[in-house]
Image: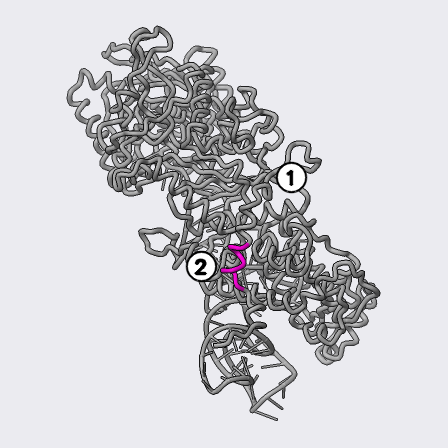
Amino acid sequence: MQTNETEKQTRYNPAEIEPKWQQRWDADPALYAAEGHDAGKPKYYCIEMLPYPSGQLHMGHVRNYAIGDALARHMWMRGYNVLHPMGWDAFGLPAENAALKNHTPPREWTLANIAAMRKQMQRLGLSYDWATEVTTCLPDYYRWNQWFFLKMFAAGLAYRKKSKVNWCPDCQTVLANEQVIDGRCWRHEDTIVEQRDLTQWFLRITKYSDELLDGLDKLVGWPEKVRTMQRNWIGRSEGTLVDFGVDSEVKAADCAKITVFTTRVDTIFGATSVQLAPEHAVAKAFAAEDAALAAKIEELLTQQTLAREAGDVGGIEKHGVDTGRFAVNPFNGERVPIWVANYILADYGTGAIMSVPAHDERDFEFAQKYGLAVKQVIAPRVDAGDVTLPYTAEEDAVLVDSGGWTGESSVEAQQKMAEFAKANGFGTATVTYRLKDWGVSRQRYWGTPIPMVYCECSGEEPIPLPESALPVVLPPQVDITQQGGSPLGRVPEFVNTTCPKCGGPARRETDTMDTFVDSSWYFYRYTDSKNADAPFASEKANYWFPIDQYIGGVEHAILHLIYSRFWTKVMRDLGLIKNDEPAARLFTQGMVIKDGAKMSKSKGNVVSPDDMIARYGADATRMYALFAVPPDKDLEWQEDGVAGISRFLNRIYRLATKYGNMSMAKDVAREGKGSAVEQKLLRKLHQTIAKITMDFSGRWHFNTSIAATMELVNEVVASESAIDAGEVSTAAVAEVFRNLVLLMAPFAPFFAAELWEQIGGEGVVFRVPWPVANAELLREDEVEIPVQMNGKLVNVVKVPAGSKEDVVKAAALADAKVIARAEGKTVVKVIVVPGKLVNLVVK
RNA sequence: GCCCGGAUGGUGAAAUCGGCAGACACAGCGGACUUAAAAUCCGCAGACCAUAAACGGUCGUGGGGGUUCAAGUCCCCCUCCGGGCACCA
């Protein structure tokens, strides 16, 4: 069979074009390299969140990177010095699971996955500077985790303590609070997290609680949603600590008083009981000499565990036990019963509260259930009659029945009563936080070894290794099982070492660091990724930071994004950097959905990027991800949509090939205004330039940017016969095609590179200056003005652009259709919005 | 329960500052080309009413009210969906 040669040439064939260009780009590592500080250009640091090397890119990645890549390329064309790096969040449990399953060492498995995914990224045509690549599981990276750990230890920011920690039986390791979701593991949504008493390493993130909170107000380039989530997570709460005396026979230590935390000290005259968490020291002391009470408290704890197993974490049925002992309210000397209740959290505040049923929903519910007294001490006004209880308002509320404080406003009383308590030695104003220190110890193999040793010379106190001993390298051969504590503990060559203090035999710490340590500072390493003497050179980080645009999934709103803010503040205080926050702007893209659910292996609705690329090409796949919806919304993957983009590219390809010779006329100047078709075509071109330029600097609604290029192409198609008839100048055709290719370059890089070459463009298309809309050509001679009657469209009239109000009005009133409609009616009023519309109010 | 988002044709969506609702696509339908199909090209397309056809008319952005010459857009109330937090004292 004969192949039609002409047809073959005009046919868009991504399978041929894309690998060809990729080869050329791979051969030129400088292509996407950022320039130095002295580039004489403004810098632009654009990052997409680094992936975990699972082995396969999924559509969520493709979408994320398509957004970042379009932005990076656009900024290059706008003349910025762009840093656009990529790396691998390469430590973590899946590598150990794979090792168990396939008997492949975690390192081998991980590095093979990285190689495969890097290849996929290159096939997608993403503009990363691979020279700055960061792989967190390699010693040249994780040694700096250890270095930071030592710095933090020296600064008192890393410490060890025994405490209740979250334990995932599936991961066989401890989890940070941030990794526990509704009482379940963030990686195993069916697994209930247990509480265990363990000695663990913590990073003192709470030292920065206030700064992390206050900094959110200044992060105007972050989504409000993320800022709100972080505010809630930090959970700052101003209140008062008040010591209640204990009136009891029990004389155990620490039992003389119970310190409660309250945000409503103004309600204290209404306290009718004190409630303790089951784990509270005083509750334990009471239980120690009262077997019946001990059994009841034990039952409360069992109920808590059962509720957790049932998946009920918040709002479980309230239960309590009367201890039979009494506490004394220091404000009025009143004796109130002490209860132990299951809804009091041991690890928030002091684990003890004063119960004020009249002014707190939960206390009210509890008092109703157990018949405790309800005493109103707050009212809207002093003489307000009955109000519905519980009455929880504090604005515009006053104290009643509160001794000498009666008549004070609630808000003022809170401050004054705290001061009074302090002056009298039974309390003080305080601030509590929901945020807890970050537990970073993990009983796993595939993570950064913690650079500490234990030696008899120091008792059980940890001894930091000297910096010269770094990196502490992971031993390659490890028997990984899911049982029996830290795998490193079973490697004698690793465990047994020499004490840096006394020179005698010592044991290494066998826990590794949470992998969120790795991702807390990786973007600093990009700026100086080969540095062997420091995590990075300060002057390099200071040049690039803060990140101008950070792009990733909203699922990291708490975890990664709060840890990395913390790490930045620590590094600043160590004098390494000058910025307070890692990223000036954050963008969280939506999920990729298929058949109404997030793509996942278990649901069997995964669309493979490789399949899409094989069928339609990388450009069409990426462009569809940007075209279907605005990037912040969830995207329902429709393969037909990708096919549509492919057709669109094909159409341009045909036109560009057809008008290739005309398009090469880059040096021919346009003369005069040209024909009406030419004017219209050029106007559309410049409108499109203006539109897309605005999308990049504003809302990032690339779906409308791409729609605009489609409109432009439709205009070219509509003008085809006129072009063929010679009614459009060669210079105008060249202007349209050259700019069209430039406008598409951020979205379809292979396609743009190919066409740029075909139409005789010079240099690398991604370094050609971004087109600028010509205001002269945008101007229309005549505009269409809609004419409404009582707000409803009647007709559209044409008037010269820039017409004055009376001209537009006259044109509207002279319109035949308007006259016909207005017959028999009176025009009461005429509203003219010049350049916009006319509305006739008729009766 | 609290705090954020949302709801627009058969579908994804557009309307950026209160000013022509449905741009641009997908799917669909009709036509051209073809022996045929694919591909490509041209056209139709919110719903309802009316009509031989054309010209038309009415309604319409989750529901109800309001402000305005004018509301998808602003205000109040409600419903549903998604996300986050949730005995945080």
Say whether residue A404 is visible: no
Residue A133 or residue A249, whichever sits in front: A133
- Marks 1 & 2, CB-CB < 8 Å contact: no
Residue at position x 42%, y 55% from top?
A: A610
The answer to which image quadrant residue A576 occupies is top right
Residue A663: mark: none
Report the magenta stretch's main SS. Answer: helix
Instruction: Specify the amino acid type for callout 2.
Output: Ala
Residue at the disc numbered 2: A614
Instruction: Give the SS element for disc 2.
Output: helix
Residue at the disc numbered 1: A81
- The crowd level at tag 2 (other Cα within 10 Å; few <14, some 14-19, many 20+) is few
Residue at position x 53%, y 36% from top?
A: A132
User: Which span of residues is magenta-colored?
Assistant: A13-20
- Residue extending furthest toward the front: A2
- Residue extending furthest toward the left: A291
Q: Sequence order check: which comes first, mark 1 or mark 2? A: 1
Instruction: Give the SS element for disc 1.
Output: strand
Give the x, y percent position of residue A650. Answer: 56, 66
Instruction: Specify the amino acid type for callout 1.
Output: Asn
